[in-house]
Image (cartoon, helix red, strand yellow):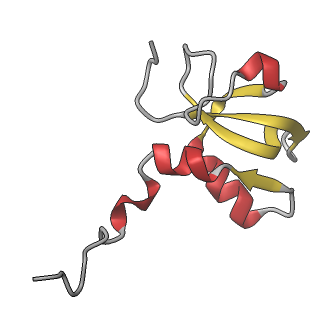
Amino acid sequence: MAGRSEPAVAASDQWLDDEGVRAPRGSVHAWRIGTNQTLCGIPLHKAGLRRFPHVLWLDARWIADTTDQQLALCHRCAAATGERRDRRSWTRRHPRP
């Protein structure tokens, strides 16, 4: 099972940053170390996704916002990590009597 609770990243491509460290690019998914699939259910090997155990999901969001690299963060993985829990949940405004 995973060694930490925060998911790492699996991506379809990679690039090297200024320090020579591999970073994700392309289609980016959340992945728990020790499993063979992303949080949205895509198998890593069959989809050809590369693992980035040193990059956390939160770091991938930061990379997407601060660099000019093309990152497409998976919205299903974002929902699986609980990213939208800070929003108010849906409620019916005018329920029927």
Query: In the image, residue 55 lies at what x, y percent?
Result: 65, 37
Q: Nearer the viewer, residue 57 or 88?
A: 88
Q: Image quarter for residue 34?
A: top right
Number of numbered discs overlaid on the protein picture: 0
Q: Nearer the viewer, residue 82 or 92?
A: 92
Q: Could you tell me if residue 21 is visible in this image?
A: no
Image quadrant in which the C terminus is located: bottom left
Q: Image quarter for residue 9?
A: top right
Q: Residue at x 46, y 18 (%)?
A: 2
Q: Residue furthest front?
A: 97
Q: Is residue 94 above or below residue 44?
A: below
Q: Answer left or right for 95 relative to 75.
A: left
Q: Is residue 3 above or below residue 78?
A: above
Q: Residue at x 54, y 50 (%)?
A: 78
Q: Answer left or right for 93 relative to 43.
A: left
Query: In the image, residue 43 lies at what x, y percent?
Result: 69, 22
Q: Answer left or right for 40 relative to 95.
A: right
Q: Nearer the viewer, residue 62 or 89?
A: 89
Q: Answer left or right for 32 relative to 68.
A: left
Q: Residue at x 56, y 20 (%)?
A: 33
Q: Could you tell me if residue 45 is visible in this image?
A: yes
Q: Residue at x 25, y 74 (%)?
A: 91
Q: Residue furthest bottom?
A: 94
Query: In the image, residue 75 lies at what x, y percent?
Result: 61, 53
